[in-house]
Image (cartoon, rainbow, N blue to C red):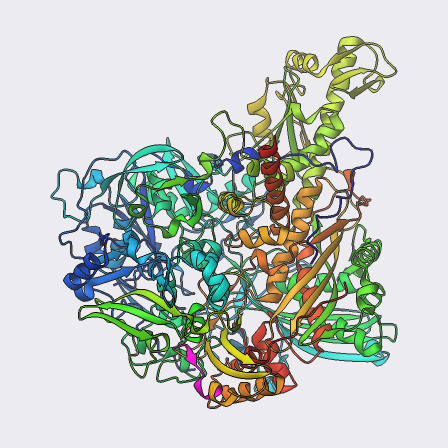
Amino acid sequence: MAVIRDVMPAFDLYQPGSIADAQKLLAQHGSDAWVLAGGLDSFDWLKDRIKKPKAVVDLSGIEELRGVRTTTDGIEIGAMTTLTDVVNHPVIKQKYDLLAQAAEVVASPQIRNQGTIGGNVSQDTRCWYYRGGWPCYRAGGNICYADTPEGRNREHAILHADRCVAVNPSDTAPALIALDAKFLLSTSKGERVVDAEDYFIGPDIDITRLHILQPGDLLTAIRISSTWAGAQFYFEKIRDRNVWDFPLMNVASAMVTSGDNIDHIRIAVNGAAARPLRLKAVEDAVRGKPRNAATGEMAGKLAVQGAIPLQFNAYKIPLMRNLVKRSIGGVEEATWTS
Amino acid sequence: MTEKPVPNLFEGAPNAVSRRNFIKGVITSGVAVSSAGYLFRASTLLHGQQVPTGVGERLLTLNVNGQQRRVDVMKQETLAWTLRYKLGLTGTKLGCDRAECGSCTVLIDGIPHYSCSVLTHTVRGRKVQTIEGLANADGTLHPVQQGIIDEQGFQCAFCMSGFIMTAVGYLKTNPNPSRREMAQGVSGCLCRCQDYDKILTALMRGAENMRGAKLG
Amino acid sequence: MSETAKPAERQYGAGYKLIGKNYPTPDLYAKVTGQAKYAEDFRADGMLFCKLLLSPMPHARVRHIDAKAALAMPGVKAILTANDLPAPADTLTDNGTVIKASKWGERGLTNEPVYQGEPILAVAAVDELTAAEAIEKIEIDFEPLPFVIDPLDTLRPGGPNPRTDGNIWTRPAAPGSQGPGTPVVTELKWTHADFAEEKHGRLPMGKAPDEWTYGDLDSGFKNAALVLDETFVTPDTSHQTLEPRSAMAYWQNGKVYIHTGTQSTAQTLPAIARWLNISPDNVVFISEYTGGGFGSKITGGVSMIIAALLAKKTNTPVMMRISREEETFIGRARPGFQGRMKVGFGKDGRITALDMFVICDNGPYDAVGDAPSSGRIVSLLYQPQAMRWRGLTVLTNTPPRSAQSSPGGLQGIVIMEPIIAKAGRRLGLDQVAIRRVNCPEGKAPFGPPVQGKRQYATSAFLKEALDRGAEQFKWNERVARTPKRIGTKVRGVGVSLSCYVGGTIGFDGLLVIRPDGRVTFQSGIGNLGTESVIDVHRAGAEVLGVPWEKCEVVWGNTTKNLPFTCVSGGSQTTHAMTRAAYATAMDAKKKLQEIAAKKLGGKPEQYEVANERVFRKGGGAGMSLAQAAKYAIQLGGIYDGHEAPADVHKLTKASVASLAGQGLVAAAKDNYPRDGSTFSYVASFAEIEVDLETGKYDIVDFLASGDVGTVIHPRALGGQMLGRSTLGIGHAIGQKWVFDPHYGQMVSVRFYQSKPPTILDVPVDMQWTALDIPDPETPVGARGVGEPPVAGGCGAILNALSDALGDEVFQRAPVNADTILTSLEAGRPRQHPLMAHI
């Protein structure tokens, strides 16, 4: 069978109006179903004719999945809320700006106008072998093409690789982990709440997906409690192009200090492994320490312990070290005289 | 030199879902013959044959450029394809069909979207505006279009309608942008002539024209 | 970085009414309203759609195709394979020479794919979905063949060959001739000893089939105060025009009608005829709007014949929409170079000797001229006192290359510029000063001696452009500014020289003065966005003194009576076609004077043409152009096109004949003399800011200062100056190909992987300026501008980077955060110095 990477294959389109209806459709179609959120990741797979689901369940008509609601203890963001709406939401801007900063550097304006927070955290990896349709581990095969002697792996993992060296490309994921967000899942067994960091999985758990959703499960909302509201935030994304690019690496931190000292802190990076990494050891090491360059240096070095570079991605080790350092010690703004 | 092993990469991905099997769909075929339905499986081809549900098109009414347009649409059809090939609105261009060039940008309820990455079935009841719907009925150009004429913006112009629609959408949120803000606003559009500087000048002139028009 | 409005535009065109003035081009209204139709916007009754089956392998032989299941599908109409292609046609040149068709040439479809993504066959069906599904039902049995991704790999002892009969293009001298003959594919392998240099990170320099020298290289090096020997690798970059090379074709009464994009309307017709092996009389070509070319669509693309042949086979119009991924494979690219230069500098920075060695990654098909061109351009731009150039054009199983804006010029200059920057630092010279001392001036020589004499440029005012640029960019202030570093941020400034060919000669122009007094210019130039299709005719209108509102330009369709026109490639159009337009307007003027003399008495030279009239000098009798046109029709003969000038091309003659009787028909060949070869020059300046902790950098400011002859249309010129600069900048900041060499597969297929620059990757306020000094060797004085700014864009960024970071950070372009960070971490360059496509 020859391959053609053009023209979306036909499918049955279902447009449920409620989570319950969506759930029913997903149960009915099982692994034949494909969940469509903003579609920016999905359409690549479909138009490349690599995935040919029989049934596509479009969530865009489900009002209850949309919008940002304030709750007694923070906010709840519907999974189908667009990234633009996340960026522009006054409460998010005011209290959880870390998330707004992250969402604002995702892809391009048009993609943010359509791409959803749920889709952004649930998107698949951008490993160019896997996305190109190569039959690698992640695609059900028995080789990782990126991790071969001549493999091209500039954008791949330096930590926690297990057969597959793909990385998670989400910008909002580390911000949500740093904000200690909770993800609400609707599953056949009922509703489930998981910590943001537990939503993501590496190849050691399941080599074919980046998150814990099983067929039939839906991510319905993301809750952020007020614990970290108004904390000191740091987000930085390093990418090749200033728009339309996935992170080579990004970092997100939330911090509460008293005086010079760090009282509470959460840090996460993405682009280093198949899942966004919460840097718990770093958090533990810097808690109680003064927030300064020296603490940042120490944190950066600690963060990259155990990192193993591939042939073309050794730069990610200093990059991660420096980003973690900055996420604690900050970075000097350069103001030039002319 | 020994031959390198060539992997059998091309027999379809191993976990690809099995071939399409037309089962009952929620949206079933209306099979109304469309005069221009030749992009996807043509209605004319299927006419008189037993039509498997899910294959055919469904008659939708879309609000495009202020008009109600009745059109047969496949379930997997993108808005860009409906506009270009069913409604003849070819000012919307397909540069990549993968949400990474911006030439297909249209406004949906006033917001810029890549029409290559929107299913037409999801825009029922929403207002779609394309480049063809921007000028007044009497031919008077939209101030952003006029700004391009004023400044000779763009070169080959294949990206132009996408840039214009994006700028028009962006100016709704920020009518008085700086050059940098305008660049950010239209940054989801790629120009391969790389005429970015002149494009920005033209769009800034367009923004100025808009403010002038409001005052006037 | 300023948020303020741009400075007031410089005024050009002193003394002219139209030349040097801004105006809205007549194609703009259709463009802004979405009415402009590009090839894929056309529809024809009953039209079929075709889809391509691309080779999954970099080199293979098709053993068997089973299309039974596909052809059995309802709605599938036809399949086209390489077996259906016409035999390759020989080319008959205008002077009657027959150029035999090359056996290595590209034909559109193939049974021996020589790159991944090469079209094997096409299927036509009633709609695209059916055609795509049909492609998936086709079974093909391939025999894999050895392949080459990195040019060095085929030069190794025992290395595989990319084509069955060899690995390099050579040009054996034609019998009895001085110049190089038709290129042929031959085999060349270097020795293990040649490759010894590789382990030191330096380019091995084995036998090179192409070589020239001038001056005394040895004493040049001996007398040098500083000798640098550097290896540098430049990227392969796809043209990626935003409009893919989609094509629609149908046949009517034995003629094929083709809609597709091209850079050159008139010149694409003979190319189509050759590819289809039919008479040019049976081709109608329509291309009013083309979505970008940059050298990839000089005469369209051979793939267009697939639509034409399927249309013939099915007797139905066929649309071939090319997808972005297909465009990535078949849409052409700039060849990357692996280059090495040994350069000797005097104390004052003057280049005493230059030994240049380049390997050009040609891809699998026709020989590109980048390698030889790189040597000539470098020799002109830096005027080395002695120089040797050696080059190889190596075939690989990677997508086909073609000229891309500044072909060879970009690669040569980009290898050279970082060396000059390094020499400036070593010798303690200012970067502008070291370039100034090497600048070409006046009738500057270039290339090797031909019959004992070196060729030379028509003119060069690059020093003035450099000085103007340095002043406008406030170079000295920027260099002197302290600190260079604040926190983790470092700033660097860079300047680069740049030049490229800027014009050809000898083409025709054609215009009609209508009986209503309006003037119609027939334009055979392609409308690819440079606006030269319209702009050059402003020179004609200027000569005739006709207000632009009364002028119309006809373009975009070979049935519209077009004159013989240059191909729009290599920045020749503005030069070549302003000359033709000028000659034609002078012909019209002469005819007007003659008509006036005939009707009103006196001698033709006693009449002048101005204000839409031809009238007796110093006042007195005269007539309007409208009246003169009516008289022209009465007079017939040469006046209304019933006779054509003897020296114009047959294509022009045919067009003149079709226009006969419609008014005063003026046609002329550009016979103006020219002493030297035409080049344009640019000095480019950039400031960048690098973050030392992340390796990320941004361009803070950019200026391109041009010596490009007389300015014809300032805004269009500015678009070229900065647009082409940005194309070059893309080579510095990220655009590239990435291949998995083990499987021979490109992995950078998408834009987010191959990284063409976005609007946020360049400063929001870029600057350009032009000297507006007329070239002395051409009427009007205009030269071309598309290519010259390209290398300067790339060079200025690279030089600004090494100003900020030092010389030991990168040895290849593009330079990204990964390169910078790895080198800073290691304290030395850490990137693979020679490997292609990483």
Q: Is residue B170 left or right of residue C497?
A: left
Q: Residue at x 67, y 60 (%)?
A: C793
Q: Is residue B172 visible?
A: yes
**Displayed quadrant of residue C335:** bottom right
Please tell me which residue is depicted at 16% across the width and 38% down the height of the picture.
B47
User: In the picture provided, is C489 more to the left or to the right than C78?
Assistant: right
Q: Is residue C298 above or below residue A210?
A: above
Image: C418 above or below C580: below
Which image quarter: residue A188?
Answer: bottom left
Instruction: Work out whether residue A319 can be spotted.
Output: no
Location of residue A207 (image quadrant): bottom left
| Stretch in magenta | A275-282
User: Which quarter of the image is occupied by the N terminus of chain B?
Assistant: bottom left
Of the 4 image quadrants, the one containing the C terminus of chain B is top right
Which is nearer the eye, C512 or C519?
A: C519
- The residue positioned 71% from the left and 78% from the top of the image is C807
